[in-house]
């Protein structure tokens, strides 16, 4: 059995034995690559599952959705461990390597930084992209000190995560993004 919906996000776990796929019809499926079978289907998002990321150090999975939520899952038992509620659709996300924080991009142009252990919003970076301009990508540098974001305002912003200062703002008419989530 496979995905009966368009896949919009994919992730391998660090060991390479699990694959997660997020779908346009709210579901996230977890495959055990040793057996080739679906181990769990996570279906508690009410809109498109726009992102999936595995924890680096523990058997956990984080998903995000246009339903304004970020959910943490235990991949061994398939249970929802916690849910973070946002005020806007979550279009993309990244996790820090120590599994402590989730960085999410949103339909309202904001980038939000969340504590997973405290289940709370730590910072709301509302100045990286034009208001109401969807953020479509967030990427951490290898040392996790810098964050690169891309928005539908055709700009790339690089931020120092230690100070939250914008280091670079790159714009050009040749920068365009064909990736779109419906609100």
Image (cartoon, rainbow, N blue to C red):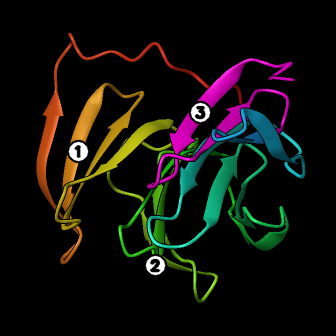
How packed mark 2 is, by other alpha carbons closer than 10 Å (few <14, some 14-19, many 20 or more), is: few
Q: Secondary structure at mark 3?
A: strand
Q: Quadrant of the C terminus?
A: top right
Q: Residue 178: x, y in percent?
A: 46, 12
Question: Which residues make up the magenta segment?
Answer: 1-28
Q: CA distance from mark 1 to mark 2?
A: 23 Å
Q: Is residue 70 magenta?
A: no
The residue that mark 1 highlights is: 157
Whether residues under marks 3 and 1 lie with C-beta atoms below 8 angstroms apart, the answer is: no
**Left or right, 51 with reference to 124:** right
Instruction: Assess disc 1: are there few (<14), some (14-19) or many (≥20) residues with their C-alpha within 10 Å of its C-alpha.
Output: many
Front residue of this view, candidates 165 and 44 = 44
Q: Which residue is mark 3?
A: 9
Give the mark toward the camera: 3 or 1: 3
Q: CA distance from mark 3 to mark 1?
A: 22 Å
Rendering coords of residue 65 (x, y %): 71, 46
In the displayed structure image, the side of residue 56 where residue 39 appears, left or right: right
Packing grade of label 3 (10 A; few <14, some 14-19, many >=20) is some
Marks 3/2 in contact by CB < 8 Å: the verdict is no
């Amino acid at each position: 059995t496979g995905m009966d919906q368009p896949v919009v996000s994919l992730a391998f776990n660090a060991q390479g034995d699990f694959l997660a796929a997020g779908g346009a019809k709210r579901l996230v499926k977890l495959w055990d690559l040793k057996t080739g079978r679906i181990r769990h289907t996570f279906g508690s998002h009410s809109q498109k599952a726009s992102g999936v990321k595995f924890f680096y150090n523990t058997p956990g999975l984080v998903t995000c959705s246009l339903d304004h939520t970020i959910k943490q899952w235990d991949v061994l038992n398939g249970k929802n461990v916690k849910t973070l509620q946002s005020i806007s659709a979550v279009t993309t996300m990244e996790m820090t390597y120590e599994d402590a924080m989730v960085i999410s991009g949103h339909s309202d142009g904001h980038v939000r930084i969340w504590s997973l252990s405290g289940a709370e919003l730590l910072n709301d970076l509302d100045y990286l992209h034009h208001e109401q301009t969807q953020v479509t990508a967030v990427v951490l540098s290898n040392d996790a000190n810098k964050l690169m974001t891309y928005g539908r305002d055709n700009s790339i912003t690089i931020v120092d995560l230690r100070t939250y200062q914008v280091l670079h703002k790159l714009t050009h008419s040749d920068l365009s993004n064909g990736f779109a989530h419906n609100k």
